[in-house]
Image: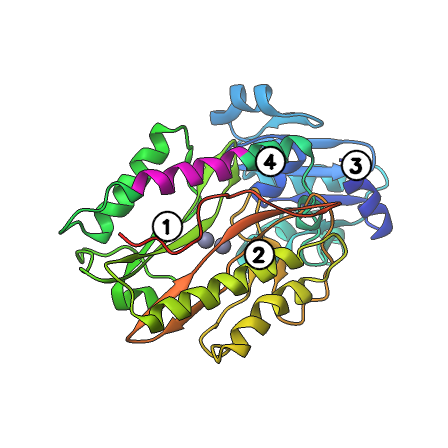
Amino acid sequence: MGALRRKLTRAGLPGLLVTHLPDLRYLCGFTGSSAALAVTRRGARLFTDGRYTAQAAAETKAAKVQIVSNPPAVAAVQWLAAQPGVEMAGFDPAHTTVAGLTALKTALPYRLRRSFLAALPVAFVESLRQVKDEDELSVMREAALLGCRLFEHILNEFRPGITEIEVAAELEHQARLLGAEGMSFETIVASGPRSALPHGRATAFALPRRGFLTLDFGVILKGYCSDMTRTVFLGKPKPKERRAYAAVLEAQEAAVAAVTSGASCGEVDEAARGVLRREGLAEAFSHSTGHGVGLEIHEPPRVGSGQSARLLPGMVITIEPGIYLPGEFGIRIEDMVAVTRNGGQVLTPAPKALIEL
Ligand code: ZN
Ligand code: ZN
């Protein structure tokens, strides 16, 4: 909260309305699904409904709790407007609908409707979330290691005739048994020519006898997401397939090696992109190298071409270059990497040498 208040002061804002639930959880610890947090320079108040009376009392830190029967964001904005010296409050334009904003304005006294709510700069609270503290890092390490255990487990589950959906089901079932609160996104299982789809959802197709198989998955542990991708080969790869895999692995390792405190996200992206360009695969690498990860699966910073944001110790990013050759195959390798004072620390130490099954 201290860092947030300093940010508010710098932005000239006496009040802040927080409605994006991951931001709210980060700031005050509450994990319920209906809430709004109002912050002023003096205090903070969490508004939620009667279903969460006990949970809010148990979880909420650094804010008073008020149970309300009207929508929490409306109650929060009315409370802010009633605070002495708060003549304006920031709201999050990235997570507020047009209808939601109208409802908030309508709830204000007439004289404040035009002037009270100000759109925050993008990623106002998210930018604080980028740098993780020791407690957050230890949870994220644990989540990442759980992902590695799932990968080891699933390698023993491939048998003739198994479908992509069954692979996903086995992985997700095991994740729960190992303590995951849930998956951090829809598990990607893409085999054979479908591996050329960067976001190939698991389908009812059986795994082919030969071809690449991409698994991209993550778990949620204590609210924090993990994210990793491994591509394995079913059967015996041809020289072209082997070469392509080696190129992606080299690109991935080059980008991991480029992760240092102070490096720009664009430089890290270029480390991977440069390798694939040299191999004639620039066109096939059709997305960014990575993204921040934390309470949400995709957070700032974006590790993409030309991004000038600099890496700081405590950030956790993914490094996930891939190539996609439509009709043929695709390959992606993804690690989670924590930025430390001494470079990048890989949080997902699952094997990356090509596994042939
Ligand atoms: Zn992923
Ligand atoms: Zn990712």
Q: Residues within 10 Å of mark 4 (few under 14, many from 20)?
A: many
Which residue is labeled 3 in the image?
Answer: 83
Distance of mark 2 from mark 4, alpha carbons? 21 Å
Would you say the residues marked 3 and 1 are in contact, meaning their CB atoms lie under 8 Å apart?
no
Q: Nearer the viewer, mark 2 or mark 4?
A: 2
Q: Residues within 10 Å of mark 2 (few under 14, many from 20)?
A: many
- Is 143 magenta? The answer is yes
Q: Nearer the viewer, mark 3 or mark 1?
A: 1
Q: Main secondary structure of the magenta part?
A: helix
In-front residue for pair 298/337: 337
* Residue 8 image offset from top left, x and y in percent: 81, 46
Instruction: Look at the image and give the residue range highlighted in magenta.
Output: 142-154
Q: Residues within 10 Å of mark 1 (few under 14, many from 20)?
A: some
In-front residue for pair 189/53: 189
Secondary structure found at label 2? strand
Secondary structure found at label 3? loop
Q: Nearer the viewer, mark 1 or mark 4?
A: 1
* Residue 124 image offset from top left, x and y in percent: 71, 52
State the quadrant of the N terminus.
Answer: top right
Task: Look at label 4 and name its amino acid.
Answer: Arg
Q: Earlier in the sequence, mark 2 or mark 4?
A: 4
* Residue 272 image offset from top left, x and y in percent: 57, 66
Position of residue 182 in the picture relative to residue 100 (left or right)? left
Which residue is labeled 2 in the image?
Answer: 291
Which residue lies at the image location 57% right of the left edge and 24% below the top edge?
56
- Judge: label 2 CB < 8 Å from ligand 2: yes
Which residue is labeled 4 in the image?
Answer: 25
Q: Earlier in the sequence, mark 1 or mark 4?
A: 4
Which residue is labeled 1 in the image?
Answer: 186
